[in-house]
Image (cartoon, helix red, strand yellow):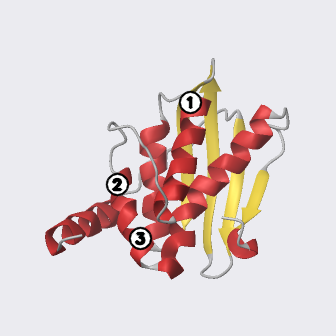
Amino acid sequence: MSNELDLMYRDVILDHYRSPRGRKPIEKADFSSEGHNPACGDDITLKIAVCDGTIKDVFAGSRGCAISTASGSIMAEILKGRTIEEAKALALNVKKMLKGEEFSVPEDVGDIDALEGVKKFPVRIKCALLAWMTLLEGIKNYETGRAKEVAVISTESGDE
């Protein structure tokens, strides 16, 4: 990446860190999940409202580093209006992107490409993945009828 692109992506990450999206509490969540990265202390709580298979609202309450917070903010911003299947596909493609694998994301995904620069810093990949892996765990519970259980993940296991 050129220095100009690096600066632009850094600005996007900082904007999402300073003004995180998805912080407005939602009244009724259809499923929730919590994630924790013990290596650096990042935490996220997700609450998702769904109607007819489409995500209507997202709460992403995160505490942690700029990358973790920005990643949760970016996720919250782009999930509204997407189906559960689209959300799952996005999360899996973000995981591929951050691991340097071939990935495919739609063009209308906002600032998600700003996360791609994180793969140059392997120690920070778990920070960027925390929100997305937490989302996948919540979706898994939702799809298996355990939506009332809070899905909890820890990136300590290396299962990202």
Q: Position of residue 72 (x, y in %)?
A: 50, 56
Local secondary structure at mark 1: strand
Which residue corresponds to mark 2? 113
Amino acid type assigned to the residue bearing label 2 in the image:
Asp
Q: Earlier in the sequence, mark 3 or mark 1?
A: 1
Point out the residue furthest to the front here: 102
Q: Which of 53 and 50 is in front in this view?
A: 53
- Separation of residues labelled 3 and 2 (CA atoms): 10 Å
Task: Tell me the CA gap for discs 3 and 1.
Answer: 27 Å
Q: Residue at x 74, y 61 (%)?
A: 153
> Callout 1: 10 Å neighbours few (<14), some, many (20+)?
some
Q: In which quarter of the image is residue 121?
A: bottom left
First in sequence: mark 3 or mark 2?
2
Picture disc at residue 118: 3
Q: Residues within 10 Å of mark 2 (few under 14, many from 20)?
A: some
Q: Residue at point 38% right, 37% down?
A: 106
Mark number, residue 97: none
Which mark is on residue 55?
A: 1
Viewer-closest of 121 and 66: 121
Provide residue 141's location: percent of width, then percent of height. Answer: 79, 41
Residue lying at 20% horizontally and 66% vertically, measured from the top left: 5
Label 2: element kind? helix
In the structure shown, which secondary structural element does the residue marked by tag 3 occupy? helix
Residue placed farthest to the left in the image? 4
| Image height of 21 relative to 67, above or below | above
The reply to whether residue 17 is visible in this rendering is: no
Lower sequence index among marks 2 and 1: 1
Report the residue at 72% width, 75% height from top.
156
Image x and y of residue 59, in percent: 55, 45
